[in-house]
């Protein structure tokens, strides 16, 4: 009997632990999504309504408990939406606010502009626009993650009108101002403070496209999600727009979309967009035509496929014509191989170091560098798979203008007859240095 009671007690305790575990994982996630397109006192924006609709759908599909989608809110509408959302965040684990539309910074405060704002004077801004501080107050009750995403850094004609109206002690800055939120709060800008974001020529803005392809990745830390968004937007805009995230989180893994498990305990399959993003990163590490071809064969459509085609097209270079081979049984009257036509002419072995902005340098050794010095003052070269033409030689220095819109300029200097030291810069903003030795 005692043994039976012990077994029953153990089973009851085990069942209670399972129930407690299940409730611990049942997080409550809420979101407020606003898209302001139709402004009464400024030209309409094409994409905020589309962007908001798509982001709201993504969050609903990802299991958010409550997603409030709002379009073209005036001042009163924004104020009431933030009030109601603040009530819904009480008891929530995750709270997200997404806003697409116009925003501006004035006097150290950031404002989100409703569609009915006229902003005829600086003093009217506080009475006609919603503050970012009010948004942060609305999400503050959430327990684990508070996230604000602002695609509100577009060029704002109302801000320019404020300057023209006069009465300001300084100009109205471009975009939004820098913010330092406290607690477990992240505020993500479509473009870093003081810069502007594009509305996009397609259905969505570049920032919204990147969010839609990565935000729903299950189990991925939100900081890595936003880092991938940054990389995609930089690639899409050729470096013209750099998203930025302000705020900090703790050392644990903080996910927006948790990994789901089926009844057998197996992890749910990764979404197609998440798989495409992961494979894109892998192909980019190789950066060869073969890698991009393999990626496009697996993912022929979508946002990442468009970026992959752009990256592959940049590898399409015209190789210099190969020199005719001298057959072993060539006739005695065949012309001998011409000697080097200058100190740069020939094949070199290069060690190279590339450094991205804000990162540590990475190195590659034993890279092939070939220089074809066609005259004492001109040359062409191949290096890193790129072809450089119209090289100019002046004494002990050579300079090649890159064939990638001027982004791959390469320059070198003979430090001695068998060594060249030089630099070149890639389209990603990598600054590379190299040292080449004559083979």
Image (cartoon, helix red, strand yellow):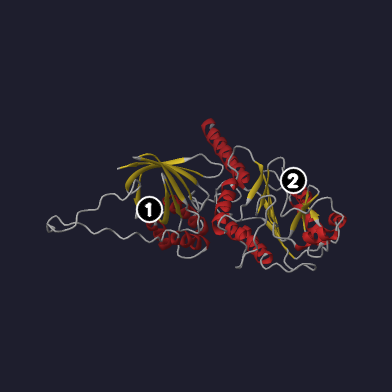
Q: Say which of 82 and 436 sits in front.
A: 436
How many discs mark residues in the rendered view? 2
**Can you say which quadrant of the picture contains the C terminus?**
top left
Where residue 381 is drawn, which disc sits there?
Answer: 1
Is residue 348 toward the left or the right of residue 161 in the image? Answer: left
Q: In this image, 90 relative to 297: left or right?
A: right
Of badges 1 and 2, the one in the foreground is: 1
Q: Is residue 352 visible?
A: no
Instruction: Please name the residue shown 33% across and 48% down the image.
Output: 342
Q: Which residue is mark 2?
A: 140
- Residue count near mark 2 (Cα–Cα under 10 Å), binned few <14, some 14–19, many ≥20: some
- Pointer 1: residues within 10 angstroms few (<14), some, or many (20+)? many
Percent x, y of residue 199:
65, 63
Q: Position of residue 325 (x, y in %)?
A: 21, 57
Drawn side of residue 179 relative to residue 292, left or right: right
In percent of width and height, residue 223 lies at 59, 46
**Residue at 38% in and 53% down:** 381
């Amino acid at each position: 009997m005692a043994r039976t009671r012990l077994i029953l007690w153990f089973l009851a305790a085990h069942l209670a632990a399972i129930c407690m575990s299940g409730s611990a994982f049942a997080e409550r996630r809420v979101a407020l999504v606003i898209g302001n397109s139709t402004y009464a006192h400024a030209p309409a924006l094409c994409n905020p309504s589309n962007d908001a609709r798509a982001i709201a759908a993504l969050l609903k599909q990802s299991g958010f408990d409550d997603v409030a989608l709002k379009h073209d809110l005036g001042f009163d509408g924004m104020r009431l939406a933030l009030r109601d959302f603040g009530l819904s965040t009480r008891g929530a684990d995750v709270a997200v606010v997404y806003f697409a539309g116009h925003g501006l910074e004035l006097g150290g405060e950031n404002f989100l502009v409703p569609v009915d704002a006229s902003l005829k004077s600086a003093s009217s801004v506080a009475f006609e626009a919603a503050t970012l501080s009010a948004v942060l107050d609305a999400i503050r009750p959430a327990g684990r993650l508070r996230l604000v995403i602002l695609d509100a850094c577009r060029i704002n004609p109302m801000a320019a009108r404020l300057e023209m109206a006069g009465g300001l002690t300084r100009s109205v800055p471009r975009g939004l101002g820098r913010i330092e939120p406290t607690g477990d709060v992240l505020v993500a800008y479509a473009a870093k403070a003081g810069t502007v974001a594009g509305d996009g020529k397609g259905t969505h803005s570049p920032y919204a496209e990147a969010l839609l392809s990565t935000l729903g990745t299950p189990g991925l830390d939100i900081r890595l999600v936003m880092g991938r968004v940054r990389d995609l937007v930089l690639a899409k805009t050729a470096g013209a727009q750099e998203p930025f995230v302000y705020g900090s989180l703790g050392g644990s893994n903080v996910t927006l979309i948790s990994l789901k498990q089926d009844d057998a305990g197996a992890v749910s399959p990764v979404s197609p967009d998440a798989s495409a993003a992961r494979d894109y990163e892998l192909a980019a590490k190789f950066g060869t035509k073969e890698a991009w071809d393999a990626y496009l064969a697996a993912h022929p459509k979508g946002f990442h496929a468009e970026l992959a085609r752009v990256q592959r097209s940049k590898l399409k270079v015209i190789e210099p014509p190969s020199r005719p081979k001298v057959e072993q049984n060539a006739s005695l009257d065949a012309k001998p191989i011409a000697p080097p036509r200058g100190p740069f002419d020939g094949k070199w072995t290069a060690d190279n170091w590339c450094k991205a902005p804000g990162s540590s340098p990475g190195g590659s050794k034993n890279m092939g560098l070939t220089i074809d010095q066609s005259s004492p003052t001109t040359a062409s070269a191949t290096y890193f798979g790129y072809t450089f033409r119209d090289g100019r030689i002046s004494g002990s220095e050579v300079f090649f203008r890159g064939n990638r819109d001027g982004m791959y300029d390469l320059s070198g200097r003979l430090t001695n007859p068998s060594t060249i030291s030089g630099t070149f810069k890639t389209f990603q903003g990598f600054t590379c240095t190299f040292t080449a030795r004559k083979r």
